Structure formats: structure tokens, C-alpha cells
Image: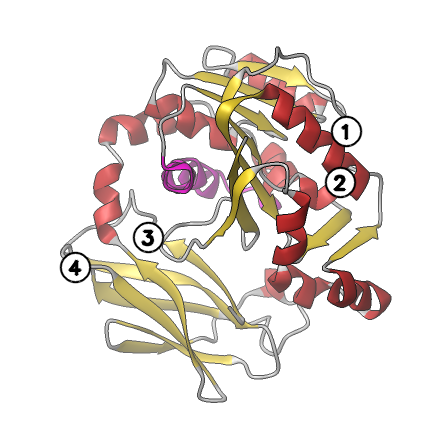
Amino acid sequence: MNVIFALDAPHYHHVRIGERNVVRGVALAVGDSPVASVTIRGVKTRVDGASPELAFLPYPHSDACRFSIEIDVPDDMPFEIRAQLESGEEVLVFLYDASLARALSMNFVNCVESLPAPTPELIAATQGLGNVESYRDSSVSGLLTLKTLIARDVDSVLDIGCGTGRLLIGWHCDDPKRRIAGVDINAELIAWNNEHLAHIGEWRVGTVAPPLDFEDASFDLIQLISVFTHLPLELQRAWLAEIRRLLKPDGNLLITLHGDIYARTLLTGADRMRYDATGYAEMAGASPGENAYSTFHAPAYAKELFRDFRNATLRPLTALFPIASMQDAWVMRR
């Protein structure tokens, strides 16, 4: 995809099926030809709303790439969201499937919304923006995305790099009997979890390198959301070995990575040349595990990195809200 696209609303648990809804988001072309407009169900709108938080990106109109449009949302079929570039090229950026709203029961949504939310400051430490409403929305939509990606029942979930439990809350509310465990190197975040979410799971302070204090074959699913994106290659390989120890036979692993779209956006000079030549690059602007330490994986390189797992697959998220912005989502089995 040559368009950075983010749909702000409506999330599937907020959509009013069969009624008029405001659809809004961001559409920014990765290249020299900006996005001119977005079309949804035959209705076109300009993409020119202020987006100062994206102005640092090296693309035309990154400071004005928001759109908002009112449409009637049908309940019988998905509808396409397409971006039109000034060059005349048209790109499918999202396939909105309103029927997915039916997969989210009100009991589940109410459970998520009833749990304590972190302060805006804590949310900003893990998400970049301290918006409490968006944080709760991502916990709801995240569960739908995770279940679609995994496509099987799981009785136990470990989140390495769990932050404040954003993507474990959904797993709990979906099935309160499910075993939930979260590990993070940030002791402040784990302290918050133990104070507010101790009743839903186990929360432990970890270190940037393995091992973890769990028994062999403990979990059906292990998820690392935006973790390998901040670890050097030797630690990535060490964690993969530890994950193989912790996963049950035939258990699932979900990892997100900075893929091609991040590389094209953020890498320059020798770093970009290294990525183009090898499929991998690191920007060591801080200590491993910190946000300023960034890594980038081309799909072929990631596939080789995951060679000790079965069925490693890069999964598209065209009809789902992302769990980690525009990061690549990889799913595989032990």
C-alpha cells in the first residue's frame, strides 16, 4: 500500500448500522503525489483537514491529511473506502464490514468500558497520544482484530510488552475464565496494572532479555505488539527461543514489526541503503527496549527470522482496525 491510512471512526462497536454515520480518518500518500480525496459509497470528500501531529512526516500535505464524510452504513455488505491521489491513481485503503459489529456483544463492550482506564500520561507513555476514549476503543477493536488474526480458541494468553494491559483487557472480557498474563520492562506500568487490574490477570516486571519466570508450555498464545520494533537482532532471536519454550504445542505467536511502509517513511541514507540491500535495519538512537531504538523488517527477512515456527504469515488488516498503527502483523505456530 502506498497510502498511510488510519480510520478514527466509527469503530465497529460504535457504528449505527442502517443509519447515517460520520466516517473520519487520515489518508497520506507515501510518495510525491498527495492524496486528493477519499470516496465512500459514491460520496467523495477532500483530504485537507489539519493534522499537525503528522507534519513531521516527509510527504506532501502531511500537515493537512484528515478527512470527514457522512454516509449511510448498510448492513448487508462491506463497503470500500478508496483514496484518490492527485496523479489519478486510486487505492483501496479499507474494507468496512459493518457485520463485524455483531461479533461484539454489549456484555463484552460494557466489560471493557467498566474497567479502570490509565491516566492520559500513562496512555501517552505507551500509545504516543493520551486519549482515554481512543484507548478504550482500541481495547474493544483490538480483541476483534486479535481473534480474527488467530482464528482459534485460546485458553491462556501472555503479552510480552503489555504496557497497561490494553490488549489483554479484551481477552479477559471475552472470556473471564481465560488465563491472562502480562510482562513489561516498565515497572510503573506494571504497578498500575497490579493496583487496578490484579483481578483479571498476572502482571510481572520483566527485563529486556529473556528468560521469563513461567513454566514450559504455559500459553496457547503469546503476543508481542511493537516489541521487536525496539530490540536488536540478537535479542529478537533470544526471545524467539524463549517463546518456543513457553508456548504449548501448536500454540500461536503474534508479533508486529516495522515493515516496508515504516522503512520508506523513516529510514534515510545508509540506514535506508542497508534495508534495501538486506531487508533489515536498526536505528540505535537509545538503549534496547526504548522507543527511540527502532528496527525495520522487510517481509522476506521476517519470514527467515521466524523459520523455527510453522506457517509464519503476514496478515493483511484491510477490514480490521490495527493493533499497532501501520505495523506488519505476523502470525505463526510453534
Q: Nearer the viewer, residue 243 or 250?
A: 250
Q: In this orientation, does residue 56 appear? A: no
Q: Give the residue at mark 3.
A: 10
- Residue 47, picture quadrant: bottom left
List x then y, in percent, for residue 223.
55, 32
Q: Residue at x 66, y 49 (%)?
A: 304
Horizontal side of 209 relative to 118 (left or right) equals: right
Secondary structure mostly taken by the magenta-highlighted segment of the chain: helix
* Disc number lying in front (2 or 3): 2
* Disc number lying in front (4 or 3): 4
Query: Which disc is residue 231 wearing?
Result: 2
**Which residues are drawn in magenta?**
128-151
Q: Give the residue at mark 4.
A: 74
* Secondary element type, mark 3: loop
Real-space Cα separation, disc 2 to disc 1, in angstroms: 8 Å
Q: Residue at x 51, y 48 (%)?
A: 313
- Residue 261, picture quadrant: bottom right
Q: Are marks 2 and 3 in contact (CB under 8 Å)?
A: no
Q: Give the residue at mark 1.
A: 208
Real-space Cα separation, disc 2 to disc 3, in angstroms: 34 Å
Q: Are marks 1 and 4 in contact (CB under 8 Å)?
A: no
Magenta span includes 133: yes
Real-space Cα separation, disc 4 to disc 2, in angstroms: 44 Å
The C terminus is located in which quarter?
A: top right
